[in-house]
Image (cartoon, rainbow, N blue to C red):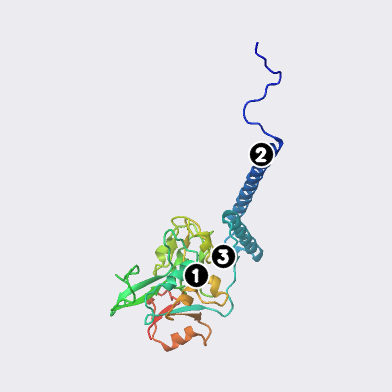
């Protein structure tokens, strides 16, 4: 006869009190993490819901603008772990911005393009660029057939260089065609876009005679380590798929009295930026003492971007 104990020992590994406590602690930690994740997801959804129903920027009160900026900063922290500083600095009284480009000094280095991409959180995946630098044969003054994607040593013999971007027209045709009022001209002359109001119809892109508008076919990709956290609501804050964007004369910098990133980065001094209403500004000196011209001036858009040569 085989003896069988009345309380047989269970098969498998034996758990002592310390092991049980460790497993219990680990389980509670996982449960807490899941609960925290769920809480963050719920918070993000609640913030996104409020964002979806907010007003056009121009219709918001000061309090409503402050609230939406706080939501956007919270969403950035939840979704990416970043802590951006988003502002909505308003146009300053007595300021009308203008730009001049010295085609006699530009050497085609494209430092301005790189600085613009970095400053304005432009999509790295699609290589989005607001600025184009065209290489043009001497003796010509037309962008027809000019190349902006050259990969050789510059400056090239027998050529000069000419930059384009948004010219912040006084009579912007892009504004006139927008069916939802998502783009407009500010008192300081900067043409802006409410990214959250834009429906992506691209009418503005078609209307712009200076190729200044850019459309996001995909969600813009910017590595966290490269995101510029100093942002403006109408400027370089992260955009989304399906909306337009463009140069804003670095509104996040210029409304603080700083130069646009492109002008600051230019190694040859080819870029002049300033207040057109200030008679002592460098931009006014250029306009009053140099022979200047504007692209497609016959269109009557009154671009606030001039070209000249020393």
Residue situated in front as seen by the camera: 138 or 6: 6
The disc, 3 or 1, on the residue closer to the chain's N-terminal end is 3
Q: Is residue 56 left or right of residue 142?
A: right
Q: Which residue is mark 2?
A: 23
Residue position for label 1: 248
- Looking at the rendered image, the quarter that the N terminus falls into is top right
Residue drawn at (57%, 61%) of the image:
56
Q: Determine the secondary structure under disc 1.
A: loop
Rendering coords of residue 242 (x, y %): 47, 56
Query: Left or right: 201 with respect to 144?
Result: right
Q: As drawn, is 28 to the left or to the right of 239? A: right
Q: Nearer the viewer, mark 1 or mark 2?
A: 2
**Real-space CA distance between mark 2 and mark 3, rounded to the nearest whole angstrom:** 41 Å
Q: Mark 3 or mark 2, which is nearer the start of the sequence?
A: 2
Q: State which quadrant residue 3 falls in.
A: top right
Give the tally of numbered discs.
Answer: 3
Q: Nearer the viewer's eye, disc 2 or disc 3?
A: 2
Percent position (x, y) of residue 204? 44, 63
Which residue sits at x=56%, y=56%? 80
For mark 2, does the 10 Å Cα neighbourhood hold few (<14), some (14 to 19), or many (20 or more) residues?
few
């Amino acid at each position: 006869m085989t003896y069988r104990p009345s309380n047989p020992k269970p098969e498998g590994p034996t758990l002592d009190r310390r092991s049980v406590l460790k497993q219990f602690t680990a389980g509670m930690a996982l449960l807490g993490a899941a609960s925290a994740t769920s809480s963050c997801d719920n918070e993000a959804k609640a913030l996104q819901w409020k964002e979806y129903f907010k007003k056009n920027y121009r219709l918001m009160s000061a309090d409503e603008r402050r609230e939406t900026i706080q939501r956007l900063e919270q969403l950035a922290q939840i979704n990416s772990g970043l802590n951006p500083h988003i502002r909505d600095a308003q146009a300053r009284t007595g300021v009308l911005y203008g730009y001049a480009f010295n085609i006699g000094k530009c050497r085609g280095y494209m430092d301005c393009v790189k600085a613009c991409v970095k400053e304005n959180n432009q999509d790295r995946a699609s290589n989005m660029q607001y600025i184009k630098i065209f290489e043009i044969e001497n003796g010509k003054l037309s962008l027809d057939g000019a190349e902006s994607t050259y990969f050789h040593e510059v400056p090239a013999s027998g050529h000069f260089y000419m930059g384009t971007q948004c010219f912040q027209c006084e009579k912007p045709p892009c504004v006139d065609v927008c069916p939802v009022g998502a783009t407009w001209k500010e008192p300081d002359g900067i043409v802006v876009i409410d990214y959250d109001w834009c429906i992506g119809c691209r009418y503005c892109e078609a209307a712009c005679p200076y190729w200044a508008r850019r459309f996001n076919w995909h969600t813009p990709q910017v590595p966290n380590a490269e995101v510029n956290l100093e942002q403006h609501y109408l400027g370089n804050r992260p955009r989304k798929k399906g909306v337009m964007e463009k140069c804003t004369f670095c509104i996040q910098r210029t409304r603080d009295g700083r130069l646009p990133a492109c002008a600051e980065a230019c190694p040859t001094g080819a870029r002049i930026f300033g207040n057109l209403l200030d008679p002592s500004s460098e931009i006014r000196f250029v306009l009053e003492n140099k022979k200047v011209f504007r692209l497609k001036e016959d269109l009557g858009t009154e671009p606030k971007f001039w070209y000249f040569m020393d």
